[in-house]
Each structure stands twice: as structure tokens, then as C-alpha cells.
Amino acid sequence: MEGDIMDKLEDMASVYEFDPLTGNIPATKVEITVSCRNLLDRDTFSKSDPRETEVIDNTLNPDFVRKYILDYFFEEKQNLRFDFRLEKPLGGIPGKNCGTIILSAEELGNCRDSATMQFCANKLDKKDFFGKSDPFMVFYRSNEDGTFTICHKTEVVKNTLNPVWQPFTIPVRALCNGDYDRTIKVEVYDWDRDGSHDFIGEFTTSYRELARGQSQFNVYEVVNPKKKMKKKKYVNSGTVSGGNPSQSTSLHYMNPYQMNAYALALKAVGEIIQDYDSDKMFPALGFGAKLPPDGRVSHEFPLNGNIENPYCNGIEGILEAYHQSLKTVQLYGPTNFAPVVNHVARYAAAVQDGSQYFVLLIITDGVISDMSQTKEAIVNAAKLPMSIIIVGVGQAEFDAMVELDGDDIRISSRGKLAERDIVQFVPFRDYMDRTGNHVLSMARLAKDVLAEIPDQFISYMKSRGIKPNPAPPPYTPPGHTHHTQI
């Protein structure tokens, strides 16, 4: 019975959008979702691994993500007919209850959009006795009868309560069939090898909310309804459609009438600190993008596109390179900090005589995929003449950035404490003036973000026994005698 139904679905799903034999164009398309319940266990030492679609290990109640898309021709007879839902018992083994196959159908809308999203979570529930959790996410779209249909599963991120999942692209009609307000349910599980995945919690949203990108609308509480209690915070971290800077949902949106948060933060901090640089030539790097022409992902690329000479002329030069870069690269995860920190550390390691001091400004949405590597890079950099300023933009939770700041607990890596506190973090949103007075709010941002730099500079010089150079003699114009009165 199962084979007959699946074979017929396979045959019908291969129909051309334009049938070359009849010249007919399908009137619409129908999506078929397949689930099974109470399958006969065919494995001796574990549960069955159902096939025909993707393989789902160790379960007798699979919900298959793969869909069958059928072309529906109004004027033709097609030998598969059922309403929204069909349940049939599975046969094949006399005298055995082989389970039930469930087919759900829905006519697909004409929406051709796709969405690229990335998610991360903070402080999820610990489910493993000897470790943390191995979380993964399952996405469902709601149906007209109140049921839900599975539409996507993420990969499993091992042994963490703060996972960052890989970006994924999904057709919008798979999420909501083009209805932007239709409920999307997301469940979070702890993966177990035997298939008995532990339920952590769930939340609901809609594509309209997700399409707002990274904002306060996309921060969710993961709730376990069975326990009637809230779990830990869960964050959608990323922007729809790849964070396209031409779309207003992106934090990098290039509004022709005002600067985005990245540009405002860069200008506010940069205009103060640039006066401490003699030539005002600054290397400016980007991280987390696909570069032309081959789409290579880079976490350390020059904004001006010049690998040999990444220097930009002043803050205006950096802003120009930033805007130009947004037009040529494709923003892409994951987000790794360590390569950029190590890049500046190599410069600092070459000049430890006190003649130069380096300040790295990182402007980020708070998502970080290489936390352990970044902590190690910062611990190593704490021995060098450098400081790191991090400005967080967007509405994400910045727990990782607070940890890197090290104000409460000195950052450590591999059992080694950082020699100095060299990181200062501030969330940009705390400085947004609701009256629109960016001048005052950006002045406060610059003041707070630069507040620790003098002490960090002095602590390095003192730790190395480096004393200030003698003050130069006062300037005396030609033909004048300088008198010092005591």
C-alpha cells in the first residue's frame, strides 16, 4: 500500500510545468506532505529508519520535510484524488499492524519569493546529563484546519546552550504559502542518538514579523507549554533575503536620506579617535560576506577591495568604502571575529616599543559564531599594545559581547586569564535619541565607548616599563628669545 501511493506521487510529481505532449499549462500546483504514525518496527536493536523521502533515523512516527509538488490540470483526469487530508493503513505484512500513512494537500499560491535567514539562541535549557544540549529547530506552517505542516529542519549544533545555526534559504510559500500573516511555529529540540529527541520549547511568529529582519519584533521566548513555564530567550539573528542593503529590513539599509546604525556608530567614534592618528589613514575590514567574482566567503576582507592597500583616507574614506562594498559583496554568515582581531594583533605585535598603540573598532549585530576562538584571540591580544571597541547595533541580545567586555569577569581561554581588560562594549540602541537629535546621542556614544581607552593605554605602558618621551622644547619663532619665568 505504501509503495503504491509513494510510486504514484513520484510519477505525478515529475509532470512538466508545460506538458509537451498536450501543450497544456497546469492550472495550479498542489503540495503533498507525507507523515506516518505507529510504523512497524523493523530494526532489532533500534527503531526503524523510514525511507522513500529523506531518511529519518530511529522513529516510528516520522514527519517528512520533503514535499511532492503536483501539477494540477483542470482539463485532464489525474488518478490521485483526495481532499485536504487522507489517512490510510499501511499493509504488506499479513496479520501485522504496519502503521498509518497520512497525506496532506494544499494548493500552492503564486508567491515566488525566497527568504534567507539565520537564527541563534541564548541560554537554552540543559537536557543532557553529561553535557549541555545538542539543539536543532523544526519549522511548521499552520494549515486551515489548525494543524501544522513541517517545512524545515536546521542542522544540529552539538553541546551548547547558545547555538548559532547556519543560514538557510527557503521558499516563502513553503513557510506560509504566500500568506504573510499565517502562523509559523518553531520547535526547539535537543538531539538524541536514539531518536527520542527532548523537547526544549517552542514559539510562534509569522513571515511578516520575520521579514522585519533583526529587530525587537524578532526576539522570542521559547516556551514549554507542557511545563507551563518559560524557557530561556531565543533570538532570530539575521535579516530576510540575505540582509540585502537595498531593503529596509536590513541593518545595512542604505537610506538615501539618513545614515544607518553602522555608519552612525562609525562616524561618532571615528571622528573623535581619528585625531590621535597622525596621517588619518585607516585600514578598514569587513567580515562575513561572499566576495566577487567566485563567491568565496571571507571573514577578513578590505572594504576598499584592495588587499595590498586596505587603507582609507579618514572616516569619510571608510564610509565611502563601506557603502561601495555593500554594492559589490553579498552579506553572508557565519560571523567570525577572531580573524579580524588576529589581523590587528599581527600589526601590534610588530611594534611593542611604545611608539604606537592600536585601537580596533568592531561594529556588529551581536551574532558571533567563533566565540572560543575570539576569546583566545583577545587573551593573546591583551599582551599587545591594542584595545578593542565593540559597538552592537540592532535589537539582538548581546550576552556574548558583554562576556567579551570582561568588566565583571576577566575573559579567559584555555585556563589563561587575559593580562589586561582591553575590550569595551556598548549597545548602540542605548544611545538612540527618540527626539531625533543624533548629534547629542552620538556624542554620548563616543564618550562612553572611548572612556576606557586612556586607562588601557597607560596600563600597557606601565606593564612594559615604557615611560613617556621627554616633552619637546617649546616652539620659538625665529629672531625671538624664549624666556622662562620662575
Image (tube, rainbow, N blue to C red):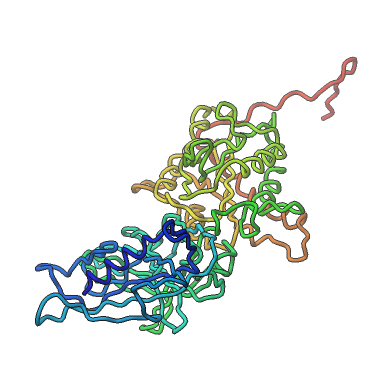
Along the line of sight, the residue nearer the viewer: 106 or 149? 106
Q: Position of residue 276 (x, y in %)?
A: 69, 36
Residue found at the far right of this picture: 479
Along the line of sight, the residue nearer the viewer: 308 or 51? 51
Q: Quadrant of residue 427?
A: bottom right
Eyeballing the image, is 125 above or below 308?
Answer: below
Along the line of sight, the residue nearer the viewer: 244 or 262? 244
Q: Is residue 34 in view from this perspective?
A: yes
Q: Quadrant of residue 440?
A: bottom right
130 relative to 151 in the view: left or right: left
Q: Quadrant of residue 319?
A: top right
118 relative to 54 in the view: left or right: right
Q: Identify the residue at image location x=42%, y=55%.
A: 166
Q: Position of residue 268 (x, y in %)?
A: 70, 48
- For the N terminus, the image quarter is bottom left
Q: Identify the residue at image location x=69%, y=29%.
A: 279
